Image (tube, rainbow, N blue to C red):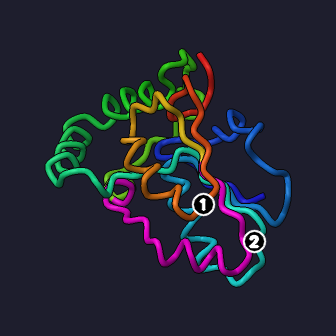
Amino acid sequence: MHYFNGFSLQDEEKYFQTFLLNSELSVAGFSYGAQKALEYVYKSKERVDRLILLSPAFFQTQKPSFLRTQLRYFEAGQEAYVKQFLQNVASPSNIDLSSCLNLGNKEELEALLTYVWEEDKIKEILNRGTVIEVFFGSEDKIIKVEDALDFFTSFTTTYYIKDVGHLLVKA
């Protein structure tokens, strides 16, 4: 399986073992990594049977002021921003993600926040025969889950898990 990490993270896939397939024909990504996973599969000429998007970072319905504010906070204090970000990723669980920390940079954060999920790309991937599964937590503090659900449910297999956040684990 080819796996793409979330923003400022590494080795966090251990939290997603129940959702992942151990197959050379699977691609998965968490949050920012979900964006990268979709782009990888879209551009790939190799066969991919399953694309697994775990809490895909979905900000295209946010106001431009939200995006500017996030970047400003990051520039003002990168370590403090990432520390708070990882707490929100783990919420409502008390999992400490510091062992998975891989401090991201402004360019990655900007790419994460400005990424636009394109329906045409998703449909092309589906037309190739790739199954796309998308997982969301009802208590996600990173994205507006309702907006993401509205986008993804019309053409992907979508799972909405109660009482979990962005990390998709129970407290």
- Cβ atoms at labels 2 and 1 below 8 Å apart: no
Given the image, on which type of amino acid does mark 2 rest?
Answer: Val
> Which of the two residues, 31 or 170, is positioned nearer the viewer here?
170
Tell me the residue at 60%/45% (across/down): 135
Q: Which residues are magenta?
A: 111-134
70 vs 52: above or below: above
87 vs 135: above or below: above
Image coords of residue 95 (percent x, y)? 57, 19
| Residue 27 occupies quadrant | bottom right
Crowding around mark 2 (Cα neighbors within 10 Å: few <14, some 14 to 19, many 20+) is: many
The N terminus, quarter of image: bottom right
Residue to which mark 1 is pinned? 156
- Furthest toward the bottom, the residue is 45
| Picture disc at residue 48 | 2
- Furthest toward the front, the residue is 154
Tell me the residue at 62%/21% (across/down): 170
Image coords of residue 122 (percent x, y)? 55, 71
- Furthest toward the left, the residue is 65
| Residue 37 occupies quadrant | bottom right
Tell me the residue at 60%/53% (across/down): 53
Image coords of residue 150 (percent x, y)? 43, 53
Reply yes or no: does residue 119 show up in magenta. yes
Q: CA distance from mark 2 to mark 1?
A: 15 Å
- Number of dots carrying numbers: 2
Tell me the residue at 53%/26% (across/down): 98
Q: Secondary structure at mark 1?
A: loop
Of mark 2 and mark 1, the one earlier in the sequence is 2
Reply yes or no: does residue 66 show up in magenta. no
Given the image, on which type of amino acid does mark 1 rest?
Answer: Thr
